[in-house]
Every structure is written in structure tokens, then in C-alpha cells.
Image: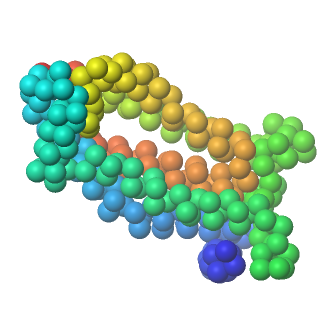
């Protein structure tokens, strides 16, 4: 972690002439952007996989009609179809999995009082009046929700709420347009119920980021806000031609 701390500190030193006391916060945002840029090829692959699965929906629907009474045979047939078309059901998970180590490093970096046996100097950096190692509860205890520290979180919550609302609407449209046949390995029995539950829950998952921002150190919160904003823009671009709502249903019918 000391190597990672040195990397972030050096990046902040480079940005200090431009951002002054907010240089460390700017370094975290830039570091997050670099991480997301590095895994962008995985995001593009995930988008291609989603488009491919959408195109396979009619074929999967036929397999469900053919093997509807034999869930094991249905699952095997769907997996064989995915393998033949070189479509991975797990491709959409890779971008999130690959950026988790960077998030946890940022979390521990600004949660630890010592690094390499020495005092953690990074905890002294601030974003405006709020220390990067503090949490929302600390801001509430020092001036309240609209105090000098609290206003930093008000701004972050506003950004997260705006991004979450955008994701909520888009996810709800996409989930409304996904047929049960598009669920990889879905059996004939509980697929409809699973799909219905997923369609109800998934749009609301966008707002879970608000809880994350409220409980992690401010530095980690900056990482989360930057990453989720990047994801919203990235998905809007990469999935702009993916059918939503009634269009996808018509395709799968």
C-alpha cells in the first residue's frame, strides 16, 4: 500500500500548481479516470456481449419452447449456443470486478492512521474544508449537514442522485425490454419470477451509491462518485443502440 500511497502523493504534487489545497482530491479523481480508462476495453467487450445476447433472444426463445420441460437440457443448450456464438454470460461483470482492488486500496489508504510504520500524511489533505479521511458522520458532527464540511457531501450527494436517477430511468427501460429468454441458463420453472424480481430491484440499485458515499472516507467517496459518473456516460454511449422497452420484446417475440 505504501507504493500506492507514493503514487497518489506524486500525482497530487504534479497537480498542486493547478488545484492548490485540493490537489489530492484532484489526484484521486484523475487516478479514478485512469483506472476506468484502463478497463474501458472490458466495458466495450461487455457492451458487445450484451448486444450479442440481445440478438440471440429469438434462438433462446425457441430453445425454451423445445426444452421447456427439461431445465437441465435447456441450460446446456443455452450454454452451447453462447459458446458457438462466442458470447460470455459473465462479460458484463468484468469491468466492476477489475476496479474493485483500486477502490479497496483507496479505502484503506485513507482509513489507516499509519502506512509503512509511519504516520499517514495523506489524512491531512482536504477538499475545501473537509478532510479526505473523514466520513459524513464527521461532517455532521462538525457544523451539521450544511456546515462547511457538510456542504461538500451535499454536492457529492447531488451528483450521485443525478447519476442514479439517470441510471434508474435507463435501467428500468432496459429491464422492461428484456425477455426471459435472454437470461443465460434460465430454467422454465422460475425464470419468469426471477425476471420479474430482477426488473423491480435492479433500477433501484443505482441509488445504493448514496449509502456508499455516506459511510466511506471522503477520498473513497470521490472515487465512487467519479467512477459511477464515468459508468453512466460510458453506458449511455456504448449501449445507445441496445433495444429498450417494447423494441426488445418485439425482437424476441
**What is the quadrant of the C terminus in the image?**
top left
Residue at x 63% of width, y 65% of height: 105
Is 253 or 132 nearer to us in this picture?
253
Is 217 or 90 nearer to us in this picture?
90
Residue 229 showing in the rendered view: yes
Q: Left or right: 100 with respect to 167? A: right
Residue at x 72% of width, y 70% of height: 20
Q: Position of residue 171 (x, y in %)?
A: 39, 32
**In the figure, 166 relative to 48: above or below?**
above
Q: Left or right: 4 with respect to 139? A: left
Residue at x 31% of width, y 52% of height: 91
Q: Position of residue 242 (x, y in %)?
A: 23, 38
Q: Left or right: 157 with respect to 140? A: left
Residue at x 77% of width, y 70% of height: 122
Q: Position of residue 193 (x, y in %)?
A: 36, 18
**In the figure, 115 relative to 93: above or below?**
below
Amino acid at each position: 500500500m505504501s507504493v500506492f500511497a507514493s503514487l497518489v502523493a506524486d500525482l497530487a504534487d504534479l497537480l498542486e500548481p493547478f488545484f492548490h489545497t485540493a490537489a489530492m482530491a484532484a489526484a484521486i479523481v484523475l487516478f479514478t479516470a485512469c483506472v476506468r480508462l484502463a478497463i474501458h476495453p472490458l466495458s466495450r467487450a461487455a457492451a458487445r456481449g450484451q448486444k450479442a445476447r440481445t440478438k440471440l433472444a429469438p434462438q433462446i426463445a425457441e430453445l425454451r419452447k423445445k426444452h421447456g420441460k427439461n431445465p437441465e437440457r435447456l441450460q446446456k443448450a443455452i450454454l452451447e449456443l453462447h459458446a458457438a456464438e462466442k458470447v460470455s454470460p459473465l462479460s458484463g461483470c468484468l469491468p466492476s470486478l477489475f476496479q474493485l482492488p483500486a477502490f479497496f486500496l483507496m479505502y484503506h489508504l485513507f482509513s489507516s492512521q499509519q502506512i509503512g510504520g509511519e504516520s499517514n500524511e495523506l489524512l491531512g489533505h482536504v477538499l475545501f474544508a473537509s478532510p479526505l479521511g473523514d466520513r459524513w458522520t464527521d461532517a455532521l458532527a462538525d457544523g451539521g449537514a450544511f456546515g462547511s464540511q457538510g456542504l461538500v457531501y451535499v454536492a457529492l450527494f447531488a451528483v450521485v442522485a443525478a447519476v442514479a436517477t439517470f441510471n434508474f430511468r435507463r435501467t428500468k427501460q432496459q429491464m422492461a425490454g428484456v425477455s426471459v429468454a435472454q437470461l443465460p441458463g434460465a430454467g422454465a420453472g422460475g425464470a419468469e419470477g426471477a425476471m420479474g424480481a430482477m426488473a423491480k430491484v435492479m433500477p433501484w440499485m443505482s441509488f445504493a451509491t448514496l449509502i456508499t458515499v455516506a459511510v466511506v472516507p471522503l477520498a473513497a467517496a470521490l472515487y465512487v462518485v467519479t467512477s459511477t459518473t464515468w459508468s453512466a456516460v460510458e453506458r449511455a454511449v456504448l449501449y445507445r443502440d441496445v433495444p429498450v422497452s417494447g423494441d426488445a420484446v418485439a425482437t424476441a417475440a
